[in-house]
Image (cartoon, rainbow, N blue to C red):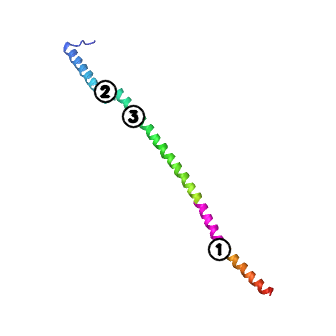
């Protein structure tokens, strides 16, 4: 046998439902307060995209500068190697030429003594 609810019970049930609906509405409102508006999100996205582009350009500049520096350093190393090789050859010739002249003058002196 189904029991019919009294008017008081129905009133309490409606009041309880009303309170539940108000609590859910407050929960939804508190969540909506935390949501970012579309305009703010669009502005943040545009700024983020702009900043990423700017940082990408800066990274490219640094990379280009590094490549330029590496190329300049390689050129410096090559020129330094060539300079050292020229200095080594100059020192060698500075040593060999006087020794050869000394040997030549000694040979001429010996030949002059022997020829007499």
Q: Which mark is residue 32?
A: 2
Residue with the most extreme left position: 8
- Quarter location, residue 25: top left
Q: In this rendering, is residue 94 above or below 10?
A: below
Tag 3, which secondary structure?
helix
Which mark is first along the chain, 3 or 2? 2
CA gap between label 2 and label 3 equals: 24 Å
Reply above or below: 84 against 44: below
Q: Residues within 10 Å of mark 2 (few under 14, many from 20)?
A: few
Q: Tell me whether the residue at label 2 lies in contact with that at label 1, contact meaning CB atoms closer than 8 angstroms.
A: no
The boundaries of the magenta stretch are 80-96
Of callouts 3 and 1, the N-terminal one: 3
In the picture of the structure, the residue carrying the numbered disc 3 is: 47
Residue mark closest to the camera, 2 vs 3 = 3
Q: Depth check: give the residue in front, 5 or 27.
A: 27
Asked if residue 81 is among those painted magenta in the image, a careful observer would answer: yes
Residue at (75% x, 81% y) in the render? 108
- Look at 59% across and 62% down and name the residue there: 83
Tell me where residue 29 appears, x and y as whole percent.
28, 26
């Amino acid at each position: 046998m189904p029991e019919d609810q009294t008017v008081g019970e129905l009133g309490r049930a409606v009041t309880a439902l009303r309170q539940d609906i108000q609590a859910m509405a407050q929960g939804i409102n508190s969540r909506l307060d935390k949501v970012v508006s579309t305009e703010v999100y669009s502005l943040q996205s545009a700024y983020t995209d702009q900043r990423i582009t700017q940082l990408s350009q800066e990274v490219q500049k640094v990379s280009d500068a590094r490549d330029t520096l590496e190329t300049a350093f390689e050129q410096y190393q090559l020129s330094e190697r060539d300079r050292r090789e020229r200095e080594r050859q100059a020192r060698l010739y500075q040593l060999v030429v006087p020794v050869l002249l000394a040997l030549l003058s000694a040979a001429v002196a010996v030949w002059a003594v022997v020829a007499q």
